[in-house]
Amino acid sequence: MNTPSAPLPHVPTPGEPVNLPLSAGTETATLNIEGMTCASCSNFVERALSRTPGVQRATVNLASEKATIDYLPAQIDRAGLRAAVEQAGYAVHEPVAPVAAGVLGSDEELAQRKAAAYRKLLRRFWVAVALAAVIMPLSMIMLWPALMQRVSMPVLNYVQLLLTLPVLLYSGREFYVSAWNGLRHRTASMDTLIAVGTGAAFLYSLAATLVPDWFMRQGLMPEVYYDTTATIIALILLGKVLESRAKQRTSAAIRALMDLQAKTARVVRHGQEVDIPVEEVRLNDIVIVRPGEKVATDGVITEGRSALDEAMLTGESLPVEKKVGDPVFGATLNKTGSFRFQVTKVGKETMLAQIVKLVEEAQGSRAPIQRLADKVSAVFVPIVVMIAIATFVVWFLAAPEATRLPLALVNFVAVLIIACPCALGLATPTAIMVGTGKGAEHGVLIRNAEALEKAYQVNTVLLDKTGTITRGEPAVTDFIPLNLPPSADQTSVLAMLAALERQSEHPLAEAVVRYTDAQGVASLPATDFQAHEGRGAGATVEGQQVLIGNRRLLEEQGVSVSGATTQAADQLLEEAKTVLYAAVGGQIVALFGVADTVRETSAAAIRELQRQGLEVVMMTGDNQQTAAKVAQQVGITRFFAEVLPQDKASKVKALQNEGRTVAMVGDGINDAPALAQADLGLAMGGGTDVAMEAAGITLMRSDLNGVVTALRLSRLTMRAIRQNLFFAFIYNTLGIPIAAGLLYPFTGWLLSPMIAAAAMALSSVSVLTNSLRLRAAKV
Amino acid sequence: MDTTEIIVLLGGVASLGFVGWFFFMAPHQVATAVSSSSGVQQVDIVVKGGYSPDVIEVEKDKPVQLNFYRDEDNSCSEELLLPDFQIRRELAPFQTTAVELLPRQAGTFEFTCGMHMLRGQLVVK
């Protein structure tokens, strides 16, 4: 049914031939309208849409509940159209937007396919287990002579054959298909080993079942190995099931990161607040965030203030206070207040996307420690096949004639089955995946596996003082009141000074405001604000002239500086502090000492690094005296003072020349050469892009505890890798000779292929489990 | 040594030789990338128990797009690694996954599956 509307000049009814020329750049959107009950409803919506600026033509179909709109994207967008419909009193039902492929595009389809493959694997496993559980007891009947007499041997063999066939053709099919595909590419994998091993056992049994007489004539018992075939397949599938479950968890961290992204955003479009999918948010949109909501994307606050939980990005557990002009990041959580922000970054540009990308890249990198394992695994399978063939020949030649064929066969199969190239292949990457993911959870972004390995070898940590040990921003350290006017107390003077400094945007003024705010002073109005470039600022507060600035400002304004004031100022200058002079009504009332302050966490973090046996060295551009003071404050004994920015890299080199492996921690652009020179560079506080490029590890959190976390995490990860590699090598170098029967002449030990299958299934699972242990580790 | 033993011995030695030759000495399938109109060097690779072709030649400093079509759902080939380019990608079964990279250096770079069993080479000239 079409909409029976009275045709408006520019709105033709559907079905009517459309001849209106559309302007270039017109786009067509289809909206699902909800709430229309009659023809007049659809009529109304159609008209409402048509009158909306930017809409060229709108048609609404009541039956299909759809509006088709041609619009100019320059003037209005989908969200705006939606707002128009909603303004008319109807709702728009948004279909689930297809997830854009990209860094943050969680690939639903891939996940579904993986889930389906896992279910299939489980089915194959259970079929194999069920049948193997029947075949096993049947094959043991021959152990009871009393039973044996009642059962016909050929019949029993045929029954076992029938039960084994589904295990082979359904449960184990993948091994044979994959082995065959591999052979066509002249590659061999674990599947090749399993296919050849179980295939040989099965074919021998098949022959013994079909032509037992031939075996008898050769003086051989027509023994069958159906139980071996079925059990091996069941056990290997068990290993695969466990492995696939564990593997899911190794990449859990990156999935968790991707899931952090908000799904929708409440934006202001054409004066209307509308909820839109986050993919539709554009640059410069104004987004509204209420308490308890996630921030949709990166931007700068334009209105309001709040505390935000940024732990998911930075690992910083305390909420961070944000006000107008402060940046906010997508995926962080708004705790207390409401605010609006202007979007500065979307999609792949956002902090979250960058983090995900960095972690993904790190997980794709290869650790130098793995080179040997890679070389071995490249030739592993063909060599194992050759060892198995040699085993067969030696056993056939050495064993007594009556048992030589079965013994040669059983050991041939055992060698093929016990060999586990997977453990070698999984040893390093799984640990790196878990380690880098764990790092990201704690705001430690590891660039690649090589950085992890370097971090493990570090024995000296060089800290660039500013921004690492200290905050890197000025703070008031001293407030010295001087000859206050009799009518005023300290608090009221502070309030007047605060009123002036609130008007200023200078970093030193901000430091004063932070200080006065912390004292809880009253808020006063200031008028006649005047900034004196390079000297300070002045304003009128409560009828009095207030000045804050350097000595020159006061002298220019005719304020006299007494000897006592000069003495107090010199004291502050000696401590390498910046001095601010404050005057009210032409009288000096106070001095502020401003300096970069040491973070509360620095001393403890440095102690922890020293406790781990690392030598901590500081470098700074400050003079010898100041450097010594800060060093002593945080417990550092060795430092470089008066280091010019361009000389930072050479200090790193100096330490390296002492035979040290140096980790350099810095935060700014001028640190980049030093970060690159160091064996391991750690860029702090999110760092600048340049610093991040040069750094092996980026710390999102702005304190030295991040360094402790990063170094400890790399040690744990490297330890797991070493354990894994050791286990994988030992397992194979011991397992293969034992399976070949090397111990037989001495101890009479032979390895049943079924035990070999169990060992093989468990070996790769052990490696994975060891890597996953990192997830629980405390860092 | 009876006849059977001699047959087994000879057969064994022959198979050893064959396995060695088959996996280590036999020639590989080489493909050279085709540059599209936009200057991107493209190569289609089928993933099925291995990579075919498994040696890919590309030119330096030109963007490369490797189109991996995974023609199986065997878990062995689900991951693709290009460690020198820091790429780890999951290949969806029976689908084409495009991997883009820009080779800056000449040389031979390996690409492998997640467990380093299946392997191929990217030769940058």
Image (cartoon, coloured by chain):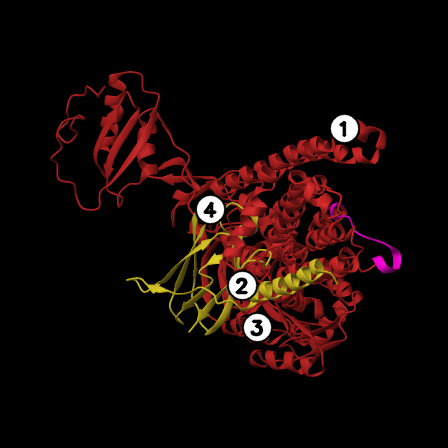
Chain colours: A red, B yellow
Return the disc, 1 or 2, that comes first in the chain's sequence. 1
Q: Residues within 10 Å of mark 4 (few under 14, many from 20)?
A: some
Return the disc, 3 or 1, that comes first in the chain's sequence. 1
Residue at the disc numbered 1: A151
Relative to B64, A257 lies left or right: right
From this viewpoint, is residue A472 visible? Answer: no
Residue at the disc numbered 4: A105
The vertical placement of A53 against A686, above or below, is above
Which mark is on residue A671?
Answer: 3
Return the disc, 1 or 4, that comes first in the chain's sequence. 4
Q: Residues within 10 Å of mark 2 (few under 14, many from 20)?
A: few
Q: Going 54% across and 37% down the picture, which residue do you hit?
A: A116
Return the disc, 3 or 2, that comes first in the chain's sequence. 2
Q: Residues within 10 Å of mark 1 (few under 14, many from 20)?
A: few
Question: Is disc 1 in the same subunit as disc 4?
Answer: yes
Kind of residue at disc 4: Gly
Mark 4: secondary structure: loop
Q: Chain of mark 2?
A: A
**Occupied quadrant, residue A2:** top left
Mark 3: secondary structure: helix
A144, A666: nearer the viewer: A144
Q: Which residues are magenta?
A: A744-754
